[in-house]
Each structure stands twice: as structure tokens, then as C-alpha cells.
Image (cartoon, helix red, strand yellow):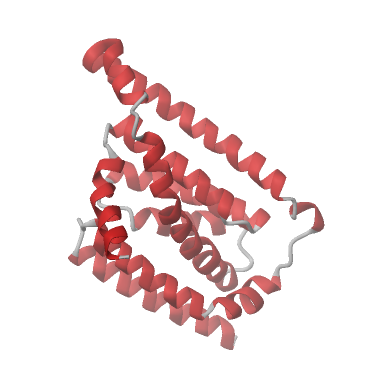
Amino acid sequence: MKERRRVALELLTLGALTTGFLLLCPRRPVLVDLALALFGLGFVLLNAEYTRTQIWGRWPLEAERRSWQRCVLVTMMLTALAMVLFLLVGISIGYRGAGWPGVAARILHWKLPVAILLYLPWALLQQTLFQFYLLGRVRALRPSLPPLSQSALNGLAFGLVHGPDFALAVLTVVGGTMWSFLYLRYRLLWPLAVSHALVGSTFYYWVYGHDLASHWSPFALGLLRQG
């Protein structure tokens, strides 16, 4: 009971702070999001041993779930399905706007691979916060819930921080639920981060027609110059 009270207090405090921040700053520059995420990551790392042993240590993985190859296969299959959906939507939008040249400009954007590479560390950071830290505490607080329900609660939290864009929030609820369920099953972060980077980048380029690499490049170059 003492441990559950600690987890409940952590989640209530985190929820109140996050809600207040999102209400005060509904639209934020990249630097603000990154600073907040890095602050959260620092807190997670300070509690990493406790999370690993006292939270996740209660539910050791079964032997058949320890295969990273199976985790990668399942994750990439689900990722491919999402990307095919985005591809079809992007083709439809591009063709309606400017015919086949519009399709090519949207789908074959040369900066897409750059965006995926830039997205990877950001995706890994988010997956660490939401899977390793938050999902473990959701499970500790409500251990009797089925894994899919625990995953859906975590996915809902993941979607809420991606507001106020409704379409993006809905997408991230679905994606967050899927990644949470996969983490419960396999306990691997890096395949989820790769999936997140692929899904996020293709969604922005193919569905929204938004050039992520151009948006992020000045910030990334600024960090490199300071380093």
C-alpha cells in the first residue's frame, strides 16, 4: 500500500503539472518541448533503479518474450500498416492538389530520411518517458487491469500531451496504446523509438505535407554550433 501511495502521489503531481503547462502553453516552440522532456528524462534517470527493480521487477518477462527479433518483427509489421495508410492518404491529397507531380512532391520528399534521423532521439526520449516510467506506474497502480486497458490509459496520456491538434492527438492515442502494449509484452524501447520516428515522419510529410526536417534543422544546427 505504501508503494501504491507513492506511485499515486507521483502521478497526481505529474498530471497536475503537465495539465497546467499544457493549458498555459497550448502551442509551444520546439525548444520548450525539448527542455521539458529533458527535465522529465532527468527525473526518470534519477529513479531508474527503483523503476527497474521495484516497478518492472514485479513482472519478469517470460522466456518466449525475450526475443528482440520477434519484437522487431511485430513492431515493424504494425508500423508498415500505419505507413501504408498514410501513403494512401498522401497519394490522394497530392493527386487532388496537383496531379501526379503533387503526389511525387509529397511522397518522395528528399528530406524525409533526414527527418527520420532527426526524429529518432526525440522518439527514444518520449518512449522512455511514457513506457519505462509512466506505463510502469500505471501498471503498479492498477495491476488488476488487462494489459490492453493499461496500454489504453497510457496511450490516452500520450495523446493528451500532443494537443491541441485533434487529429494528431487521436493518432498518438492509437500509437501510444500500440507501443505501450508492445512494451508490456517485450520490454524493449529501441524498436518502439524506430517505429515512432517512421510513423511520425511519414504522417507529417505524407498526410500533413509538413517539412519536419526544415522545421528542426535550424535548432539542430544551433545545438551543434554550441557543442
Residue 152 versus residue 140 in the image, above or below: above
Q: Is residue 26 above or below residue 210?
A: below
Please report the residue visible at 57 percent of the width from the left and 68 percent of the height from the top. Answer: 136
1 to the left or right of 196: right
Q: Can residue 182 be seen in this view?
A: yes
Tell me if residue 148 can be seen: no
5 over 152 or under it: above or below: below
On the image, the x and y values in percent for residue 97 come to: 22, 17
Percent x, y of residue 144:
64, 66
Q: Most extreme residue toward the right, as rendered?
A: 63
Q: Which residue is drawn at 34% across and 48% down?
A: 169
Q: Image quarter for residue 20?
A: bottom left
| Residue at 29% from the left image edge and 19% from the top image edge | 94
The foreground one among 111 and 96 is: 111
Left or right: where does residue 155 sit relative to residue 218? Answer: right
Q: In this view, does 14 lie above or below 213?
A: below
Name the quadrant of the N terminus: bottom right
Q: Which residue sits at x=25%, y=58%?
A: 222
Q: Which of 226 and 166 is in front in this view?
A: 226
From the top left corner, tell me how far across and down residue 227 is, in percent.
32, 65
| Residue 88, picture quadrant | top left
The percent coordinates of residue 7 (x first, y second) are 51, 79
Tell me which corner region of the image, top left, top right, bottom left or bottom right, holds residue 132.
bottom right
How many numbered marks, from 0 up?
0
Can you name the residue that lies furthest to the top here? 99
